[in-house]
């Protein structure tokens, strides 16, 4: 059963819709928070339907109301609009609409710019306030989406994807509400140790950073050099006889000169200062919590992004500031070798599945005789998933293809489809954008133009090759988190989720759960069991395993 929440003028409405799309009843509601509580008490499995979780759910959480299940029309529209499974549906064939604009705005705008104010959504006490869905026909869109799933070529898979995507939206809002426990004092201590004391004047370099700048200037005989400027630094390196085409660390490491060591150290510390220095600390850590703006589905493959805070690029250098509350622990878990295992399961390649059954998939590949070392196994798998055709990866690929023909054929087929400009899809039905770079033969082109066209096609083929693997890995991770959330909800006996074990951080294939110390072992078991749940949800009965590396720690940096 579904309850569709929407606004009409200054009226909040709830429409009851059956699983088959039959509209049962509609009525106005005065207090949405109270209505959600009463409805879930009567029907715990009811699914709330709204235009955008990021607009509705923060207000409910602020009122201490937690939603069990939802259907996020914005996120689901993006999937159904583009999926190859629904290409014949009314929704997919319709001209661009406000829903398409909402999808784009949701990816681009920070959460606080999308979500209506709490008073707007619940009280309507501002005469000028407008709720974001007033120009959207929410019920009509929901019925279109139900029809698109029902008439698709893979309704079961799509339904699992939409459920997982919507659950992810709830989890993103809850993690932002709960926040990641963060010690500002510990963070300041890390910065002081690495950079020196905080400058008293904004814009000044900390003393250790300034000392490195002074050393670099002397070694390059450039007393006014600003090494933060790539253009200035390249000129100074050239004058000193150092031939560098970029200032990237990986290239600088290949060069030999006394300036390279202090320059690499400067770049590391400058990156820390810029990305997670005192200004970041002042902006993003409030009352002992870091609350980033997660953007579910923010990447074309379905991976999450962030619109602020840089949560998905949290360096190990500052993870020591992520400290559990007194009497609490972190359960930190990450999926080992996730993408190769995803490929094995997608292809149904029993040989590769068996290689990973004992734990280390790369060691299993070596044991099978496909390659001679673990390093070569890893290199070959990366080449298969990312399209390496030269060097050591290219040399190893034929051996991998002979050992695991189904897995390698799957990514090769996806690459060829991309080169032809075709769409490819993940296991549950998220499809790639249509290719615009197909290398069609045109005898009016010069040989150089044809070569350039073919290279663009190959580049898009490398994208589609990886799209199916990375996108399916994102689906697995969503199912994993959704299962963790469900299991923690059942484990809890408290009235509010932040008083019990709850998710506080997610990074592609890694989760952090904040948990009372006495429950840490039990929660670790549930997190592991949830990985098996996710495998069954995405791949059914294929016996692929998704082992986790799990740690129970007081600080995030202790997990690895």
Image: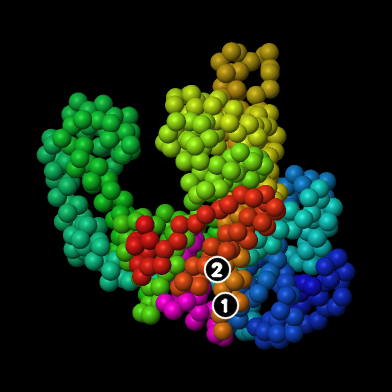
- Asked if residue 470 shows in the view, the reply is no
Is residue 46 toward the left or the right of residue 353 in the image? right
According to the picture, the residue beneath numbered tag 2 turns out to be 526
Q: Judge from the rendering whether residue 105 lies leftward or rightward of residue 322; answer left or right.
A: right
* Mark 2 and mark 1 residues within 8 Å of each other at the beta carbon: yes
Q: Quadrant of residue 253 in the image? A: top left
| Vertical position of residue 410 compared to residue 496: above or below | above
Residue in view at x 77 percent, y 82 percent? 28
Q: Is residue 217 left or right of residue 53?
A: left
Q: Is residue 355 above or below residue 325?
A: above
The quadrant of the image that shows the C terminus is: bottom left
User: Closest to the observer: 260 or 41?
Assistant: 41
Q: Secondary structure at mark 1?
A: helix
Q: For mark 1, what is the residue?
A: 491
Q: Is residue 47 above or below residue 109?
A: below
Q: Residue at x 52, y 54 (%)?
A: 547
Whole-percent x, y for residue 356 in the image: 54, 45
| Magenta span of residues | 494-519
Q: Residue 118, image x and y in percent?
A: 58, 78
């Amino acid at each position: 059963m579904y309850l569709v929440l929407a606004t009409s003028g200054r009226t909040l409405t709830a429409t009851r819709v059956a699983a088959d799309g039959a509209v049962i009843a509609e009525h106005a509601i005065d207090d949405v928070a109270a209505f959600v509580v009463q409805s879930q008490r009567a029907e715990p499995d009811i699914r709330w339907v709204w235009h955008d979780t990021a607009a509705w759910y923060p207000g409910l959480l602020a009122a201490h109301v937690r939603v069990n299940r939802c259907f996020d029309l914005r996120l689901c529209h993006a999937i159904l609009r583009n999926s190859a499974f629904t290409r014949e549906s009314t929704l997919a064939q319709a001209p661009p609409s406000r829903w398409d604009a909402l999808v784009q705005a949701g990816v681009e705008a920070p959460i606080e710019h999308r979500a209506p104010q709490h008073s707007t959504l619940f009280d309507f006490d501002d005469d000028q306030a407008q709720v974001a869905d007033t120009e959207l026909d929410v019920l009509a869109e929901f019925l279109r989406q139900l029809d698109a799933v029902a008439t698709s070529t893979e309704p079961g898979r799509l339904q699992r994807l939409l459920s997982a995507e919507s659950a992810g939206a709830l989890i993103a809002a809850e993690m932002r509400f709960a926040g990641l426990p963060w010690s500002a004092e510990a963070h300041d201590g890390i910065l002081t140790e690495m950079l020196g004391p905080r400058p008293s004047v904004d814009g000044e370099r900390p003393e250790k950073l300034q000392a490195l700048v002074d050393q670099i200037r002397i070694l390059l005989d450039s007393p006014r050099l600003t090494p933060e400027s790539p253009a200035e630094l390249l000129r100074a390196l050239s004058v000193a006889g150092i031939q560098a085409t970029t200032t990237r660390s990986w290239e600088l490491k290949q060069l030999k000169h006394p300036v390279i060591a202090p320059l690499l150290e400067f770049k590391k510390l400058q990156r820390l200062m810029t990305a997670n220095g005192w200004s970041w600390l002042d902006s993003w850590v409030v009352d002992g919590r870091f609350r980033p703006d997660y953007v579910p589905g923010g990447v074309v493959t379905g991976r999450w992004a962030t619109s602020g805070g840089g949560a998905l690029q949290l360096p190990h250098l500052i993870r020591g500031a992520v400290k559990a509350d007194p009497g609490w622990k972190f359960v930190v878990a990450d999926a080992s070798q996730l993408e190769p295992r995803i490929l094995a399961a997608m292809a149904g390649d029993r040989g590769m599945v068996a290689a990973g059954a004992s734990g280390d998939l790369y060691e299993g590949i070596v044991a099978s005789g496909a390659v001679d070392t673990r390093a070569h196994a890893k290199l070959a798998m990366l080449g298969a998933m990312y399209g390496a055709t030269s060097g050591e990866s290219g040399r190893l690929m034929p051996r991998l293809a002979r050992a695991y023909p189904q897995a390698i054929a799957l990514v090769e087929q996806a690459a060829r489809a991309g080169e032809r400009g075709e769409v490819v899809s993940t296991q549950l039905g998220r499809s790639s954008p249509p290719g615009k770079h197909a290398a069609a033969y045109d005898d009016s082109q010069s040989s150089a133009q044809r070569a350039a066209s073919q290279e663009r096609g190959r580049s898009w083929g490398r994208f589609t090759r990886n799209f199916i693997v990375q996108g399916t890995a994102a689906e697995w991770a969503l199912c994993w988190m959704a299962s963790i959330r469900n299991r923690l909800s059942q484990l809890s006996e408290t009235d509010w989720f932040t008083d019990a074990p709850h998710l506080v951080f997610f990074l592609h294939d890694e989760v952090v759960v904040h948990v009372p110390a006495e429950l840490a072992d039990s929660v670790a078991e549930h997190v592991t069991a949830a990985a098996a749940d996710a495998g069954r949800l995405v791949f059914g009965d294929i016996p692929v395993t998704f082992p986790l590396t799990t740690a129970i720690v007081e600080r995030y940096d202790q997990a690895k």
